[in-house]
Amino acid sequence: MFYESNKKVNHARFKPQTFALLNRSRKAGIGYSQCVLRPKTTEEVSRILSFCNEHRIAVCPQGGNTGLVGGSVPVFDEVVLSTSLMDQIISTNDTSGVLVCQAGCILEKLDTHLADHGLMMPLDLGAKRFLSSWRQCVKANGEVLDCLRYHLKHLFIGSEGTLGIVTKVAIQCPAKPKAQNVAFLGLESFQDVLKTMKKAKYDLGEILSSCELIDELSLDLVTSHLKLNSPISVYPFYMLIETQGSNNDHDEMKMNAFLESAMSDGLILDGTTTNEVSKMQSLWELRERITEGLTHDGYVFKYDISLPTKNFYSLVPAMKERLGDSAKRICGYGHLGDGNIHLNISVREFTQDILDKIEPFVYEFTSKLKGSISAEHGIGFRKPKYIHYSKSKESIALMKQLKAMMDPNGILNPYKVLPA
Ligand code: 2HG
Ligand code: ZN
């Protein structure tokens, strides 16, 4: 039974029919809650958790609520603890580059603020690293943890609110680049994509900041449904390559030399490059709005998978072979530089039959290639029962022990991350 591991938690709606709701929310990502709390300070988070812990009330921490696996969706009637009002920037040090802010700040706001200080966030679509040096967290029982030792802060990163709630972060921000260039390329095969990425790493070196892959059917989503214009004609694969540096002449020279050489090697069939802000934005939109394009394509099964670079795209043809005509569209795009592919399968409407064809096959396939069933979007509510495909028995047992130690009453984000 779903509740067994969380018996001690009180739910007002603990009735058999909730399992029907559960299935509905599983399909549609719909949540249920009668109470949303929006604290403004660490102290308020601490008081809420201490109260909920004492009364065994389940809490669903919610940040930006942009996840794909239901990690921030209340499953039954958990109290939602939203960090949306915890959006204060506490300090910005222009010299060290350290920004201290509350944990509910959204990236765009931070980036705009940092630009005035000549800095930028070291994090975007998984392409850049997140360097946080210090955090403040609130434990399930309301205790506030500061200045963690033993690198304990890493326990909270990626725990999806199951071990504690991060309330404050300090982030080491790099200088905002003076020069930026974006290239959008068309390629014939995935083998050429791999060779081009390798070449980009060698030729562009320290200024290479993003390397994204888009396949033909992914680009079609934004050109057909969103009416965006592609600067080049139709190819099986596209790459978006970005550089960031401090000297535009130098960066432009490197980018042009890289493109010329990749073209003469026959790796790239067509391409365009720019450093004009509005044109760079338009190129990035072709990549960043694919998710939005998918929402116009029917019911979508979404998978966020890590695979070794050489097998990065292999899941897409495997899935096409498996599903044949039963899917409307099977496409793959994502953060090639990080080995993180977004496999999306759209169908006219959800059926259990098609879900059964996709899962657990998609996870077995990933596991055989030594990939991870979850890359940047976490395990959430949708994937706990598949976690064993990429984590060993021993790791899962240790995670359960840590959970029991940190949150003995199981109030924090129940049903998420860990299998029952
Ligand atoms: C992206 O990279 C996001 O665009 C969303 O992580 C991925 O919708 C998706 O599958
Ligand atoms: Zn992504």
Image: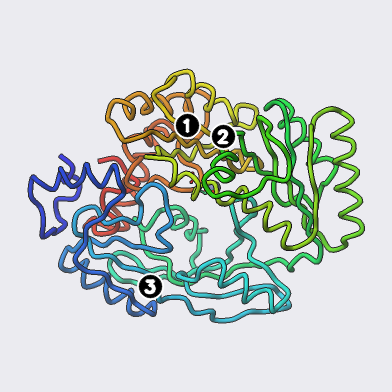
- Mark 1, other Cα within 10 Å: few <14 / some 14–19 / many ≥20: many
As shown in the figure, which amino acid type bears the numbered disc 3? Val
User: Assess mark 2: CB under 8 A from ligand 1?
Assistant: no
Q: Would residue 14 be found to the left or right of residue 396 on screen?
A: left
Q: Which residue is mark 3?
A: 144
Q: How is the image coloured?
A: rainbow
Q: Amino acid at mark 1?
A: Arg
* Residue 277 picture location, percent across and down: 74, 63
Which of the marked residues, 3 or 2, is nearer the chain's N terminus? 3
Which mark, by number, is residue 329? 1
The part of the image, by quadrant, that contains residue 326 is top left
Residue 380: image x %, image y %? 36, 48
Q: Is residue 81 above or below residue 413?
A: below
- Name the residue that disc number 2 marks: 217
User: Which one is nearer the viewer's eye here, 398 or 322?
Assistant: 322
Q: Is residue 163 above or below residue 41?
A: above
Q: Is residue 383 left or right of residue 292?
A: left
Q: Is residue 46 left or right of residue 104?
A: left
Viewer-nearest of discs 1 and 3: 1
State if disc 2 and disc 1 touch (CB < 8 Å): yes
Q: Nearer the viewer, residue 173 or 353?
A: 353
What residue appears at the point 47 percent right and 27 percent down from the top-left corner? 367
Rendered location of residue 254, percent (x, y): 89, 48
